[in-house]
Amino acid sequence: MASEGLVEHPVGVTKPLSLTGPTQSDFLRNNHLQKLLEDAELYETPEEASKRQHVLTRIRKIVIDWVKQLTRLRGYTDQMVEDANAVIFTFGSYRLGVHGPGADIDTLCVGPSYVSREDFFFILHNILEEIEEVTELQPVPDAHVPVMKFKFDGISIDLLYASVSLLVVPDDLDISDVSVLYNVDETTLRILNGCRVADQILKLVPNVEHFRTTLRCLKYWAKRRGVYSNVTGFLGGVNWALLVAKVSQMYPNAIPSMLVSRFFRVYTQWRWPNPVMLCAIEEDELGFSIWDPRKNPRDRTHHMPIITPAYPCMNSSYNVSISTLRVMMEQFHFGNNICEEIELNKSQWGALFEPYMFFESYKNYLQVDVIAADGDDLRAWKGWVESRLRQLTLMIERDTCGKLQCHPYPHEYVDSSRQCSHSAFFMGLQRKEGEVIQEGQQFDIRGTVDEFRHSVNMYVFWKPGMEIFVSHVCRRRIPSFVFPDGYRRSRPPRQHHDQSSPIDEGCSLQAEICWKTRPNRLKVIVSWLSGKLNLSSKLCPEELMDVFQIQVLSQALQVK
């Protein structure tokens, strides 16, 4: 007979690796981990939770009134107007129960067949614009998953809309039922599947509370270590949820302290691109494409497949590249080493959550400066640029045959001393480990960067003042605004678990990167900065950006 509370018949596509439950030492470590999460203020207060519920109630009333208004305008009967309805669902971290203070609420509105996505982005948008509590309203109708972003009484909302094949949407609509997918297009399918995947995850884990605590912990760890961002090629919320859910299935009787340790043990040994799956891939007569590398050549190119459990099953991590997978594997090994030390009482949980010292880890970086005329323009422009950074990583991998590795850092920096609205992103650059470089050999990525800038400047909502500048910067010339107190922290002693390559204090680019500053361009720039530099000086990024802001460089590029 199994011990009280232990799972005897676990769920999952494979059998568990272990049914072992916790020891007294595991319980003690679990208490310490729980206290760390609470001290890090990862849980919202009851007042905040109540405010979120109130906001969702208000939004539900607004969308129902909107649907009733459209029903009346389109000539339906009084009874249809009375029955007209829309249903609000949540997904993402809020639905999974792992959101923290200040987190947004991923929200889905499901409406009847005669209320379209165009009605959502025009008529509902206009209604929201007139509501006093609504601020920072930003429709994104052309996104892969169209969304309306706004704040309602200070709470960030990402609102999606799906029209289903029903004249009247019941309050008890089961969004997990495959019938909601009848006669929907591919975009609506993607919109609906966020909620469907979240519901399936909660059904497929053996202990929901243990899953939630472990996921909250791993999301916090991923953000501290710089590997939490789907848009830049790492993993986002649903990806981390699926990875944690898989480990929960493998160790169904483990408590969170055990699951965190097992998480790193499992994924340091995982043989990618073998897929992570919570259940068998379901095929259905609806005819939607499912993830299947045997049939779909594109699926064979995925580096880290993490498959969603709701029909139609898809790879949620198609954004992962060779470079970002390398970075994540290094961080998994870091986490595994720390957890082994914790289990031997040689370390504490705090060591696991030490922030990754990105600006101490590489000799060379790309700095991507994004500039716009005002804050609203910058918000839209930088969102577009950030969504394209993954393409820059792929282009550099392609054009250097994988010999130059990129580490896009999923964090935005702001130089508050600038008069214009500004944001900056950084990418670490290094040779592939073990790659033999001949003396004088260089990586010429000028054409790659030009191609990237050209693709970014194709932004359909571009406005005057929206500019992007990509510059090379060596480690010792990293601008001060990236550091919390405006100055560089002293570099700590290297730990044995640090996987990064040794850092050269110098800034020599020989056999590293060929960058673009032709001598006669440099003369023009220097002439504008007379008294600040001489012809033998090297321009640091701050000086280059001074020139960029007065648009001198664009003139200099015309000089032959």
Image: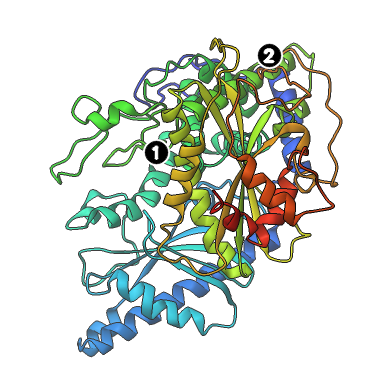
The x and y percentages for residue 358 are: 69, 33
Numbered label tally? 2
Label 1, label 2: how many angstroms apart (C-alpha)?
A: 30 Å
The mark found on residue 316 in the picture is 1
Which residue is disc 2 drawn over?
A: 340
Q: Nearer the viewer, residue 314 or 201?
A: 314
Q: Amino acid at mark 1?
A: Ser
Does residue 205 appear in this view?
no
The x and y percentages for residue 275 are: 37, 24
* Identity of the residue drawn at 52% across and 30% down: 444
The x and y percentages for residue 372 are: 60, 64
Dot 2 lies on which element? helix
Q: Amino acid at mark 2?
A: Glu
The x and y percentages for residue 460 are: 40, 63
* Identity of the residue drawn at 34% across and 24% down: 13
46 to the left or right of 136: right
